[in-house]
Image: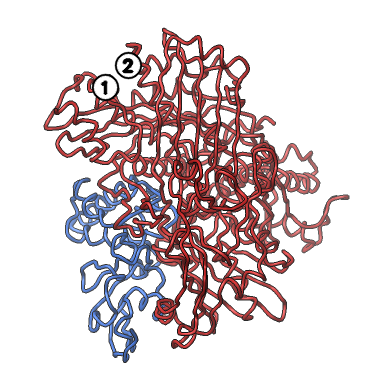
Chain colours: A red, B blue
Amino acid sequence: MSDPRPVFRHIGRPVPRQEDDRLLRGYGAYVDDLPEPPGTLYLGCVRSPVAHARILSIDLAEALQMPGVVAGYTAADLTPSIRTMEPDRPKPGYKATFRDVMPTDRVRYVGDTVAVLLAEDPYLLEDALETVFVDYEALPVVVSIEDAIAEGAAAVHDDIEGNIPFAGEYKTEGFDAVFASAHLVVKDTFRSARMAGVSLEPRGVMASYDKGKGALTLWSSTQIPHLLQASLGELLDMAESRIRVVAPDVGGGFGIKAHVYPEEVIAAALARRHGGTVKWIGDRQDDFVTSTHARDYRYDVEMALAQDGTILAVRNRLHVNIGAYACFPFGSSAEAGGGAIYLPGAYKFAHYAYATHSVFTNTAPVGVYRGVAAPIAHFAQEGLIDRAAAALGIDKLEMRRKNLVQPEDLPFTNAAGITSDTQSHAACLEQALAAIDYDGFRRDHPRGEIRDGKRYGIGIACITEHTGQGASRYRTRGLHRVPGFEGATVRMTADGRLVAAVSQSTQGQGHLTVFAQIIAEHLGIDPSAISVEEGDTATTPFGSGTFASRAAVVAGGAVFRASEALAAKLKRIAGHHLEVAPEDVELVDGEARVAGSDMTMSFRELAAIAHSLEARPLPDGEEYGLESRAFYDPPNVSIANAVHAAVVSVDVGTGRVAVERYAVAHDCGRMINPMLVAGQVHGGVAQGIGEALMEAVVYDEDGQLLTTQLLDYLLPSTCDIPDITMAHIESETDATLGGFKGAGEGGVIGAVPAVAGAVNDALGETGAFVNQLPLRPETILALLRPVAD
Amino acid sequence: MTGDKIDISVTVNGRRYRRAVEPRRLLADFLRYDLRLTGTHVGCAHGVCGACTVSIDGRTARSCLTFAVQVDGAELETVEGLAPDAELSAIQAAFHRNHALQCGFCTPGFLMAARQLLAETLTPTEEEVRTALSGNLCRCTGYVNIVRAVMSAAEDLRANREASHV
């Protein structure tokens, strides 16, 4: 559908957020800030301290005698009343996977919940948790990908042979012949760290059961209220009509909160059992131990090239350590499937083959996290281009220019079968180079120069971002629990004001503001006067939730469509009373006007007519009310793109890498609010710099987690992230309603390969290339040592 | 462990409170659950993230590392006290204008830390702003717009001060 409005009044403006005022005054209401009903009980979880063991006995006797303790339950008490989670159904390549929210027979990672206590006070709860005694019989532990797939490795789940619940393969026709004929093959093994998402607000949930109505209300720091509602209904055998899930203010998510967690299900089950309110608030240690981890990939990638630097074919062998259980609702394949298809990215080679595997280990479950597998896919790809450029004696930029998808190639279907109608790599590259002053850097920093004990390097990464995936995409990927579409209701109240309810939930992206901008565009009213609500299953239409850069595209499309229909109805009513055709009516500044005349009707008048609150009738055949509901399922996937440019310094004495300057040229189609797009990119870049340089979740060989606090897991601070220069390109697409593409993940996807590439550049004539993240001082010093010696 | 409660008297945002608290009760919990001032957030409980930053007798402090009994007789200010009137303070307004908050969970701590800096100097360099805020973690913004907002607030406050001297 092509967009009818060449000129936009509200879409495209940097409107400050309507979310801000209350948050700035300290009036935000995150789940732990909500008033607690009288009699609220606090839930505490007894976690397994061992990575793999049979549970022999659990002794709650002493805990139950402690002050304030009301009840205690072992898995044997609770699990029979809660259905087993089934993230994956069996089909070719996918094995069925299962998880009990509390395992009854054996624990599979440090953090599995074996018993719970309810107490009247959180301090007394902590005292009592110390006294629970559990006897375990240790079982063999597998921690790394290599441990888990080794011959004779212990099985994490008895029914999953070789610890591989998902495997996929793909090869373009004629791949082998082309690969064999190549002038040069470069290859390496690229590894990411295991990471933690670390939203500043840890997870939390409060569940209230109304015995009279038999109804459950559950407030959770979730990104997926509607999918959580559906899951609770399934796992607790309750009608969804009796379950209301509310995501209040949520303090960051980044994908980590887009999963259904055992604590949500346990809190709901116990609220029902006790007929009251049960509250669980995770602390930072709970978050590191039990929230989904991320990344933990091994990419073995080979790139075949012609002598002139043309990339001919890429072979990708990928393993993902997904921990002890498949995450819910995404299942075992989200990372491994994504990592396989992200790799062709911005480059137009014709031949691609992959073999991808998810691997169970005795570690915390790994789930989706901003960027999913794409940052490491691009780290591998850009890293191999750097190696090939060095081997062939071709300039790195020249290599990229030669292989990028160009405007004349569009629409383009890449070697993994992903089609896109618009991409602007070449334009983004030139803008990013200008913004970072690439030529100036090259002039000022001769190769191999060490200045004040530092080497300097510049890195360029050309990336794609798979955004706004629709129902067809999730079906293709085998993610049968992810719907893909979104819904929106736009309504004019009887006093002529506008309210909307959207199927999303927000964790800080600014949804309320951008959806108000879309509504404002159609209804001709200032966005600040429009109230948008999200996160409550009782008041918002069904939808998938907030993840995978989908809000602007998918929910934005639903808002777009609902707004269009409501505007059309207002024009019909106004046209009828003003005695003109609806198409001669325009909606501007809160009223309906006849173009080229002084005839107007206010929204208040139109609303009164539509609600039968005044003498004038509705036109024949028009329904009462001013409410428009729409669902939108976008095309398969919308490909956004960007070029990131980073300048780093590498201290040759200490090995410390610092990001000195940073620039991004970014294209997410038509921007609804460029200020918020920039904010998304900034935050993503910071997470990418953390991923590239410092963040790592560490287990020892026994599966003990060594990074359980922010003292152990280093996050970037104000001193680690430089100012970021942004350039925006808005490729026009009519593939999605409004021409929007997603923007949530490009920042992190680009930052990882750009920073790694800058370090490669700084290492320069040493001939060393990085292949393992994070690039901490010890890694850098090891790469520099041969030179020093 | 539990112990006898101790009477304390504390002024928060200009209002006097008298309460009996256990010696082990954290100031953050006292503010959040006893006084229902939930704008102060706890992100790590180890003094690393800075979300719980409040002002005690004019100096910023981690309320997650302070016991409530330690502030007996003290004057505290929390995020709820920054804009007693309808208008946002200059720092809050600059955060809004510059899109310096996303999820908002860390924001109260940043506002308190920024206020301390601008109480000391209205002409901070960008590096001084970064150093002053380096004890506060944000996972959403990449700090870019936070630093810009504090620089912008300093400029506004300078302009106000000059205007008031005219």
Q: Residues within 10 Å of mark 1 (few under 14, many from 20)?
A: some
Q: How far apart in space, not on screen, are marks 2 and 1 (Cα)? A: 8 Å
* Picture quarter with the N terminus of chain A: top right
Question: Residue at point 62% right, 61% down?
Answer: A536
Relative placement, left or right, of A773 versus A499 is: left
Measured along the vertical axis of the image, is residue B114 above or below residue A63? above
Measured along the vertical axis of the image, is residue A193 above or below residue A648? below
Instruction: Residue under label 1, please give it.
Output: A767
Relative placement, left or right, of A229 versus A746 is: right
In percent of width and height, residue A382 lies at 40, 26
Q: Is residue A419 visible?
A: no
Is label 2 on the same chain as label 1?
Answer: yes
| SS state under label 1 | loop
Q: Is residue B73 visible?
A: yes
Question: Between residues A224 and B8, which one lies in front from this camera angle?
Answer: A224
Measured along the vertical axis of the image, is residue A7 above or below residue B70? above
The three-letter code of the residue at mark 2 reads Ala
**Chain-order first, disc 2 or disc 1:** 2
In percent of width and height, residue B121 lies at 17, 56
Farthest-out residue, front: A152
The three-letter code of the residue at mark 1 reads Gly
Chain under numbered label 1:
A
Q: Which mark is residue A88?
A: none
Residue B16, quarter of picture: bottom left
Farthest-out residue, right: A620
Q: Residues within 10 Å of mark 2 (few under 14, many from 20)?
A: some
